[in-house]
Structures are given as C-alpha cells and as structure tokens.
Amino acid sequence: MRDNQPKHRQMRKEQRRIARQKASRGGLPAILVVCEGRETEPNYIDGLRDHVRINAAAVHIEAGDSVTDSVGLVRKAQKLFKSDRDYDLVFVICDGDSNHLAAARALAARPLRNAAGVTTEVQIIASCPSIEFWLLLHFEYSARPFQNSAEAQQALLAHLPDYQKNDRDIFRKSAAGLDLACQRVQQLKADLRTSGGIAPDTDMPMLVEQFRRMQRP
C-alpha cells in the first residue's frame, strides 16, 4: 500500500501557511515556537495562547521531540524557519541549566530573512533550572538556587500535588497566578542584580508580553 503520510504532511503544512497568511492580513505576526519539552511547554503555551484569545493560526507550536539541548533546538527552529519563511518571530523555549546555553544564544543571533524580506532572529526563552520554576512562580516567590529540574518540580508539587509533565490542563491550573508570576520575575531579576547571582531565572514573561500584544480586543 502506498504511504501517503508525506503528502498529508505537506497538505497540513500548506493549510497552516494559508491560515497564517490570513492572520497576518489581520495584523497579527506569524510566530514559530519550538519547545524543548514534548508536552509540558507545548501544553502550557497552547493554553496561554487560548487564554489571551490569539488566533491559533498565528502561533505554531513545535515540540522538540528527540532534540533536547538548546543548541539543537535553535538549529531546529532555524531549519523550520528556512523551510517556511512566512514567520515573523521565532522563539525557542528551553531549560536554562544547559551547558550549551551560551553557544545557543550565539547561534540564535544569526539573522534570518522571512518571505517579506524582513530580518529576524531566534529569541531564546530559558528557564533555569527548568519550566517547573516558571510554574512555581505562579504560586510563590522563590530565589532558591535549585540544583536541577527535579528540585524545582518537588517545590511545585507543594502547590500542584497532581502535577505531571503530560498534563494538558497545566495552564488552566496555574492561570490565576500568571500576572503574579510576571511580577515575581521582575522582583527576582532585581534581587539577582543585587546579589550578583544568575539563577534561578526565567525569560517566560517575554513570551507572555508578546502574546498579550497580539490579544484580540
């Protein structure tokens, strides 16, 4: 039997492209988001997108799947962009405890030119040690220097005892604390500047702010 999967994938890609063009004509930038995680980050960002009432066609969320290091994720994002240059903005969501993060930022700074001739670059949204720290900030302020993702996840379990990485409702369960989380990141960054520390930290408010700029009235 003939395998039609490549044909179907191409059809879906073309359908997404047409939908993005319609959203763009409505004044929305087309955004590509490549996530390190297979489920937690995509599920959270999908919920955030719905929460701020963004046209789903304007934001394409891609899981990293087998790619888990920040350099590999940037390369994947750049490859996806080059295969479909309709995007205006590109984000990579990754853990900040990676030894490759500095190299990833250097690679991400390489310019990309979209179909309209506009230059952009990959923007890295890192959370140190992991996305669980960003989720924790929805419930409490913390500047604890977590040694790894497991420690951050353990702290999160105090607020979300049923937390699992494949929870499709993770945004809904934490949404009430979204504004507080953004405020706590501002406080955290100020405290880090004062102390000279670098972790824990998260850039997730950058993505939240971008989504809110795209919010439907």
Image: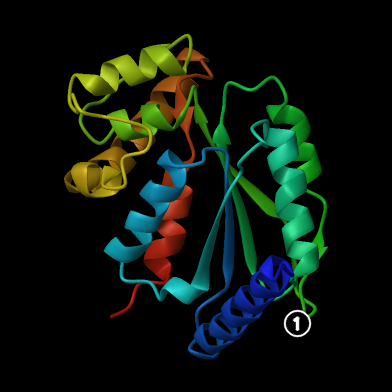
Determine if residue 115 is in view: yes
The single residue placed furthest to the front in the displayed view is: 1
Using residue 95 as the reference point, say whether residue 85 is left or right of it.
right
At horizontal 49% and vertical 75% (from top left) the residue drawn is: 57
Q: Is mark 1 on a helix, strand or loop?
A: loop
Rendered location of residue 166, percent (x, y): 37, 38
Which quadrant is home to the N terminus?
bottom right
Disc 1 marks which amino acid?
Answer: Ala
User: Which residue is at the front of the view, 159 or 206?
Assistant: 159
Is residue 158 depicted above or below 70 in this figure? Answer: above
Q: Nearer the viewer, residue 36 or 89?
A: 36
Residue occupying image coordinates x 31% and y 30%? 164
Please state, as top left, top right, bottom left or bottom right, where the C terminus lies in the image. Answer: bottom left
Residue marked by disc 1: 116
Where 29 sits versus 66, above or below?
A: below
Q: Where is residue 208 in the image (x, y as percent from the top left)?
A: 40, 54
Residue 35 position in % (x across, y down): 56, 45
